[in-house]
Image (cartoon, grey):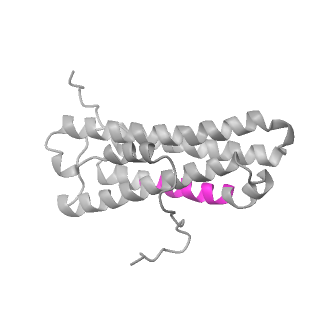
Amino acid sequence: MERHRQPGEPRLTAASLNFAAMGTLMQKMPTYTRYTSHAHAVAAERVFRRAMGARLKECGDRLLGVVEKKAQIMSGEMEQTIDVLVDRIGEIFRRLDREGVVTLVGGSARTIAEIELIDSRLVLLIEESLELVNNLGTDVPAAAWFKTDAARLARGLAEFSKLTEERNYLLGLGWESEFRPKARRVS
């Protein structure tokens, strides 16, 4: 049974990329019921956020690599599109880099279920982003990619950014966490 998509929600495709890389990312998804201490929660979060960041870095590196390899055949508009996409990835990095004390918001069971759903969607969005970026370097004509796939990638990155911020809030890492006193790191 397929879940109905909301208007504007990106269509997520089935697994089609490097299963090892995506499997590793899924293995790093935190088990929130094991967040028994702040130190454990912060450590688990750090691992998962870095894993997501690494996959997104692949997207950004691939986009920048295409600009370097195909600079002579790309229009200024195409280069600007890639710059915007890379900037969106940078915005996501800033959200993934949010620090603070992990404190689940609201009822734990409900919050955990919500975060797990978000995490699953984030993994699928990363996979779709990697697939779209990889299409740019294949036999698909670049002009066609910029007409269709670039817009899909932009929507996917916007959704990723929104979900990351929602996830941060549910973990007690909303933007206001940046202004709380930092917890001392335990070595």
> Which quadrant, please, contains the N terminus?
bottom left
Which of the two residues, 74 or 69, is positioned nearer the viewer here?
A: 69
**Residue 67 to residue 143: above or below:** above
Dominant SS of magenta comes to helix
Above or below, 177 relative to 3: above
Residue 177: horizontal and vertical position, in percent?
33, 42
Q: Would residue 47 appear left or right of 8 to someone viewing this image?
A: left
2 vs 94, nearest the viewer: 2
- In the shown orientation, is residue 14 left or right of residue 99? right
Q: Residue at x 58, y 52 (%)?
A: 131
Is residue 107 visible to the viewer in this orientation of the structure?
no
Which residue is at 13% across, 43% downward? Answer: 36
Residue 104, position as x, y percentages in the image: 23, 52
Q: What stretch is highlighted in magenta?
A: 150-163
Measuring from the top left, give residue 153's x and y in whole percent. Answer: 61, 55
Residue at horizontal 54 percent and vertical 65 percent from the top = 10
Percent coordinates x, y for residue 96 in the rendering: 42, 42
Q: Which residue lies furthest to the left in this view?
A: 36
| 125 sits to left or right of 103 | right
Residue 154 seen by the camera: yes
Q: Is residue 38 magenta?
A: no
